């Protein structure tokens, strides 16, 4: 980092990213050899994320731990599902997941974590620093803000010196149309996706695909 | 002070960090040039300054030039710069030390800044509400806060115009992503003039004291591009969370733990979007006004943008 001393310890910005893009990311990197240097997840639209801010509908919580409690939450946005995992090292987030009654709108601040499955796929999840219940207006605000940020990133991909975009093209290819499409879907869905106003039955019902996504609780720091 | 003496003091101050020099010595040299050799004072000053530059092996740029740059107060972002200001004395505070002659707040259209004048500088006393041109003040930095020091070489000129003082306010918008430790129900040191927050019942300055309860929130607001540290004082905290001091004390009493207050507040504010306006003090923005943002962003215009890509 080229910043002065006072800036070098500055807090990592929380990136706004839709689930569809977040879950496509798999490449992580550090920018220095220091053990404590932050680990970044490279987003397909060409940005590094050491922290994310997500608002969506918590549709399901489950204690997937064996000995200790280890809570998994599914958080749905207009483009897909974020998985969050909280165990003994995230006691506040874990107790929020334990106490919340889905469906509920939640805001999550957390760190991206990647986990390689036995068959070589990389799953991405969020290790929450905080989870709080919020209202529909906050969720709508997040969808629009995240759409806007995503478009800005797509727009900046061809900018000279956009190092992360260059890395993203190498890692994931250069077809970003999928992400501009999800942005449009997300925005168009704003008025019609008021899950909580309904009877709560609209949550995704798939139970089968997530067993592999469970990171090893023992691998937490 | 005579004009010659003022110039001498200015030169002595400039070189005091670099060479062993006294005002008297500089004055003698100036006097010789001006009185014996009939050199104009400006030229004499230049010449004497150059002789000290040579003696110290310095370049002109290495020392603070006499007659600093005219700046507005919120431009000040470096330590030990010599600057000129055009300011109104907004308020005087009580000096906490005998060595300080005057301390208070100066302001111009850009905002306000603290100033200190020392007894040893023997300057004329400034008056609250009066506007001045101050030449040759030195900037100072402490933990990211800037102030200016008046010194022997500072010239003070009263001006008749009225200066509108700005309020340093800025507005930030973003998601509240963290409530930091030291938030919620806190205790402050009750000693006169000390408002330090106690750690485990101890004040860093006054040791173990019987603290006074207060409310505050230290939060981080993240706009997706940068993070901002924001402090909500008691009044702002009460308005933000709906939890008043008395209620907070009761919550803590019932739980036998003050941390429940911060937990309760976290649940109310984390993850929401806010617009916050207030002055910046060091790294912090002090929240004077704030508003929760709900749906203030324009989905239509973002949709148009998306379709145009």
Image (cartoon, coloured by chain):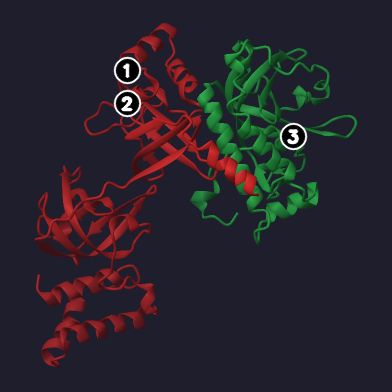
- Tell which tag, 3 or 2, sits nearer the viewer: 3
Q: Is residue A165 above or below residue B271?
A: below
CA distance separating discs 3 and 2: 42 Å
Q: Is residue A208 above or below residue B76?
A: above
Work out whether residue A37 can be spotted: no
Local secondary structure at mark 1: helix
- What's the mark number on residue A23? 3
Above or below A18: residue B243: above
Q: Identify the disc placed on residue B234.
A: 2
- The residue that disc 1 covers is B245
Q: Are marks 1 and 3 in contact (CB under 8 Å)?
A: no
Which marked residue is nearer to the observer: mark 1 or mark 3? 3
**Badge 1 and badge 3 both on one subunit:** no
Query: Real-space Cα distance between discs 1 and 3?
Result: 44 Å
Q: Residue A38: where, in percent of width, then height?
A: 65, 42
At a point 53% along the width and 42% down the height, the residue shown is B301
Residue at 28% across, 61% down: B138
> Residue A50: horizontal and vertical position, in percent?
64, 40
**Can residue B149 be seen at all in this image of the molecule?**
yes
Name the colour assigned to chain B in the rendering: red
């Amino acid at each position: 980092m080229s910043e002065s001393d006072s800036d070098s310890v500055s807090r990592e910005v929380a990136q706004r990213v839709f689930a569809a893009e977040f879950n496509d990311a798999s490449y992580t990197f550090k920018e220095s050899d220091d053990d404590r240097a932050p680990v970044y997840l490279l987003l397909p639209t060409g940005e590094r994320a050491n922290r994310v801010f997500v608002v969506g509908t918590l549709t399901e919580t489950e204690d997937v731990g064996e000995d200790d409690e280890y809570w998994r939450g599914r958080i749905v946005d207009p483009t897909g599902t974020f998985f969050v995992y909280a165990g003994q090292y995230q006691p506040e987030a874990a107790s929020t997941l334990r106490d919340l009654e889905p469906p509920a709108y939640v805001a999550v601040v957390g760190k991206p974590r990647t986990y390689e499955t036995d068959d070589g796929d990389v799953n991405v999840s969020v290790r929450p620093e905080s989870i709080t219940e919020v209202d529909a207006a906050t969720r709508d605000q997040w969808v629009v803000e995240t759409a806007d940020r995503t478009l800005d990133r797509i727009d900046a991909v061809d900018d000279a010196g956009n190092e992360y975009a260059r890395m993203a093209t190498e890692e994931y290819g250069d077809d970003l149309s999928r992400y501009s499409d999800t942005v449009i879907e997300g925005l168009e869905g704003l008025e019609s996706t008021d899950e909580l106003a309904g009877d709560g039955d609209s949550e995704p019902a798939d139970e089968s695909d997530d067993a592999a996504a469970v990171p090893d609780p023992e691998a937490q720091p | 002070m005579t004009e010659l003496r003022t110039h001498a003091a200015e030169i002595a101050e400039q070189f005091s960090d670099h060479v062993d020099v006294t005002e008297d010595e500089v004055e003698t040299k100036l006097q010789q040039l001006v009185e014996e050799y009939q050199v104009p004072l400006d030229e004499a000053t230049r010449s004497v300054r150059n002789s000290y530059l040579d003696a110290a092996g310095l370049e002109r740029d290495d020392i603070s030039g006499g007659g600093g740059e005219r700046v507005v107060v919120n431009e000040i972002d470096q330590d030990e710069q010599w600057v000129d200001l055009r300011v109104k004395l907004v308020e005087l505070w009580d000096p906490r030390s005998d060595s300080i002659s005057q301390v208070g707040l100066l302001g111009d259209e850009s905002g306000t800044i603290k100033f200190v004048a020392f007894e040893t500088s023997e300057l004329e006393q400034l008056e609250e509400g009066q506007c001045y041109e101050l030449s040759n003040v030195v900037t100072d930095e402490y933990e990211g806060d800037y102030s200016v020091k008046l010194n022997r070489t500072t010239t003070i000129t009263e001006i008749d115009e009225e200066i509108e003082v700005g309020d340093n306010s800025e507005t930030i918008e973003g998601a509240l992503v963290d409530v930091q430790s030291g938030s919620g129900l806190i205790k402050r040191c009750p000693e006169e003039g000390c408002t330090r927050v106690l750690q485990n019942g101890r004040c860093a300055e006054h040791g173990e004291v019987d603290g006074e309860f207060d409310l505050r929130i230290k939060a981080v607001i993240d706009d997706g591009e940068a993070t901002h540290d924001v402090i909500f004082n008691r009044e702002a905290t009460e308005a933000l969370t709906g939890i008043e001091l008395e209620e907070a004390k009761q919550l803590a009493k019932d739980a036998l733990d003050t941390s429940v207050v911060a937990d309760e507040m976290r649940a109310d504010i984390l993850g929401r979007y806010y617009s916050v306006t207030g002055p910046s003090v060091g790294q912090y923005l002090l929240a004077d006004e704030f508003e929760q943002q709900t749906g203030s962003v324009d989905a239509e215009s973002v949709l148009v943008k998306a379709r145009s890509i």
